[in-house]
Amino acid sequence: MIKHLVMYKLKENTPDNRKALVEKFYTMKGKIDLLVELNAGFDIVGSARAYDVALECVFKSKADLDAYAVHPLHMPVKEYVHSVISEAHSVDFEF
């Protein structure tokens, strides 16, 4: 299994913008079969220190993570994310 954790800094950090980004992430839940688990929010440990929203995805393998990056259902979400964030930081963990 591989855990993909991404933390995002919003261009405008407001409660509505945080909520909108989290809701956008959840549009992928259950629709992309590569995802074993998806969590998003602004309460994930560590995200509040320097970032506004965190996304945590779990995949069966690195190949699934790579496939997710170019998945057709993920692409519109990525476009939206790029329009509202100023920076992001990602970390992958294998377990």
Image: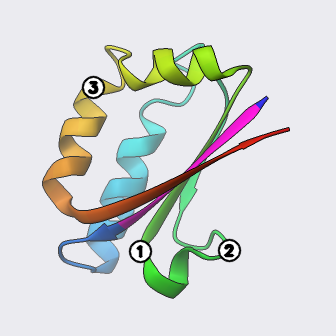
Name the N-terminal-most of marks 1 and 2.
Answer: 2
- Label 2, on which residue? 45
Residue bounds of the magenta highlight:
2-8
Q: Amino acid at mark 1?
A: Asp
Q: Does the magenta stretch mainly form a helix, a strand or a loop?
A: strand
| Residue for point 43% across, 75% down | 51
- Label 3, on which residue? 75
The answer for how far apart the CA atoms under marks 1 and 2 are is 11 Å
Horizontal relation, residue 76 to residue 46: left or right: left
Q: Amino acid at mark 3?
A: Met
- Label 1, on which residue? 52
Horizontal relation, residue 85 to residue 19: left or right: left
The answer for how far apart the CA atoms under marks 3 and 2 are is 27 Å
Secondary structure of residue under mark 2: loop
Q: Is residue 7 magenta?
A: yes
| Residue for point 31% across, 57% down | 20
| Residue for point 74% across, 20% down | 60
Q: Position of residue 21 (x, y in %)?
A: 34, 55
